[in-house]
Image: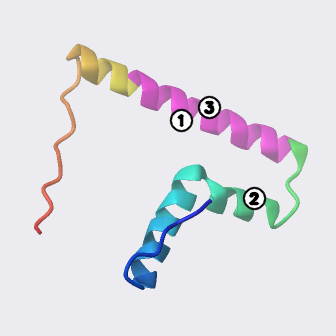
Amino acid sequence: MQVIVRDNNVEQALRVLKKRMQREGIFREMRARSSYEKPSERRVREEAEAVRRHRKLVKKQMQREGLLPMPKKAVRPR
């Protein structure tokens, strides 16, 4: 993974890097690999993640079809 530092602005480059790593799931993977996880615990965790992903997908589909209200867009002041 590569981030370009512009105008010697290292803080901004670090923010961008952390955001990219978060999106890729690197922090979650590092935490998971820091200690041993029993196969039964791993199976339970993966099933829970699959359920969460499925619920999120169903919710988005229902929003697109108009069965649920769309989420409010956050207005950020500049």
- Is 58 located above or below residue 23 in the figure? above
Q: Residue at horizontal 42%, vertical 85%? A: 8
Q: Quadrant of the C terminus?
A: bottom left
Residue lying furthest top in this view?
A: 65
**Which residue bears the numbered disc 2?**
32
- Is 45 located above or below residue 26 in the figure? above
Most foreground residue, 19 or 52: 19
| Proximity of marks 1 and 3: CB atoms separated by less than 8 Å | yes
Per the image, is 51 magenta?
yes
Looking at the picture, which amino acid does disc 3 mark? Ala
Q: Quadrant of the N terminus?
A: bottom right
Looking at the picture, which amino acid does disc 2 mark? Ala
**Which residue bears the numbered disc 1?**
52
Residue range of the region highlighted in magenta in the rendering: 40-58
Q: How many marks?
A: 3
Horizontally, residue 57 falls left or right of residue 78, namely right
Looking at the picture, which amino acid does disc 1 mark? Arg
The disc at residue 25 is none
Helix, strand or loop status at disc 3: helix
Residue 17: percent from left, percent from top: 52, 67
Residue 9: percent from left, percent from top: 40, 83
Q: Residue at horizontal 62%, vertical 31%? A: 50
Horizontally, residue 72 falls left or right of residue 32, namely left
Residue density around tag 1, few if under 14, some if 14–19, many if 20 or more, within 10 Å: few
Residue 35: percent from left, percent from top: 84, 65
Helix, strand or loop status at disc 2: helix
- Residue depth check, mark 1 versus mark 2: number of the one nearer the observer: 2
Most foreground residue, 10 or 40: 10
Q: Quadrant of residue 15?
A: bottom left
The disc at residue 50 is 3
Comes first in the chain, label 1 or label 2 = 2
Per the image, is 76 magenta?
no
